[in-house]
């Protein structure tokens, strides 16, 4: 049965809009866990636009399930991860000007670099996931670089405008899931998933975990975080 991993970055985004102490993403993580989330995700960006070093250190201390640190594959972040020791790291592409992550890692462009990053993180006992587009060649490159898990980027599917686009993009995800399973990789999926478009994923039972943030936080503004998390878990467990 698939699990829900909740990304709490946008709690910190609201805090940073006013440069105050509230709302606290660490408190939000506790509420999400009590509501049934089985993993908490935070992205420590190089520009610290939302989650900061204090958040990460406290999250490591208080989280009872699993902590997934999203990060760029750069020396600064590898060192921080080695010191904090989250349960897992997800390597993601990062551009300063982007509003949110726009696509998957191009692992094929520099496989040696990613293999060295994995080696350093694995030496600290940290499992490594690669955030990749639904492209079997990128999944194979991640596998060769030593990935334990691939998180399949669902953003293009989520942003589809026409039914034909949605169908084509969903089929690419389905093929990527099969390729990942053939390589014995752990499989997660995320980006842009919400309470409506996730329903189609009931046809992909090999996905083990869904990484969701924005849609849960948007719903939480209306119904509360506990309810928003429980509603999403209800959909996923219903698969």
Image: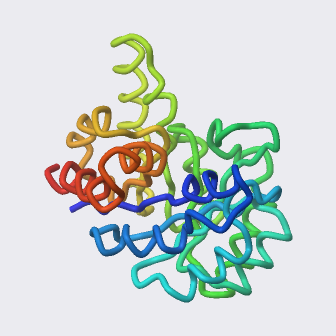
> Is residue 29 shown left or right of residue 93?
left
Say which residue appears at 82% left-offset and 63% top-offset.
Answer: 74
Q: Is residue 127 above or below residue 10?
A: below
Residue 36 visible to an observer of this rendering: yes
Q: How many marks?
A: 0
Say which residue appears at 42% left-offset and 63% top-offset.
Answer: 186
Q: Is residue 123 above or below residue 42?
A: below
Residue 178 visible to an observer of this rendering: no
Say which residue appears at 37% left-offset and 67% top-offset.
Answer: 32
> Is residue 207 shown left or right of residue 231?
right
Q: Using the rendered view, name the quadrant where residue 116 is placed.
A: bottom right
Percent x, y for residue 105? Answer: 67, 46
Q: Using the rendered view, name the quadrant where residue 160 is placed.
A: top left
Q: Is residue 83 above or below residue 189?
A: below
Percent x, y for residue 11? Answer: 55, 57
Say which residue appears at 29% left-offset and 39% top-offset.
Answer: 195
């Amino acid at each position: 049965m698939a699990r829900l991993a909740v990304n709490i970055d946008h709690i910190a985004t609201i805090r940073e809009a006013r440069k105050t102490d509230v709302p606290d993403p660490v408190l939000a993580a506790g509420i999400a866990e009590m509501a049934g989330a089985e993993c908490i995700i935070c992205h420590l960006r190089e520009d610290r636009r939302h989650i900061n070093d204090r958040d990460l250190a406290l999250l490591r201390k208080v989280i009872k399930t699993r902590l997934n640190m999203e990060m760029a594959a750069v020396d600064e972040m590898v060192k921080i991860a080695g010191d904090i020791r989250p349960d897992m790291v997800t390597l993601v592409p990062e551009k300063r000007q982007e509003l949110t992550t726009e696509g998957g890692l191009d692992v094929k462009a520099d496989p040696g670099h990613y293999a060295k990053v994995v080696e350093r993180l694995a030496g600290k006992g940290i499992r490594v996931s690669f955030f990749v587009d639904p492209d079997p060649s990128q999944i194979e490159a991640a596998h060769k670089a030593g990935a334990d898990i691939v998180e399949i980027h669902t953003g293009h599917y989520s942003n589809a405008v026409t039914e034909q686009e949605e169908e084509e993009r969903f089929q690419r995800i389905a093929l990527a899931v099969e390729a990942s399973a053939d390589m014995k990789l752990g499989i997660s999926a995320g980006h842009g998933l919400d309470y409506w478009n996730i329903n189609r994923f009931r046809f992909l039972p090999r996905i083990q975990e869904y990484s969701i943030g924005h849609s849960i936080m948007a719903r939480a503004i209306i119904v509360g975080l506990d309810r928003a998390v429980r509603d999403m878990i209800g959909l996923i467990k219903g698969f």
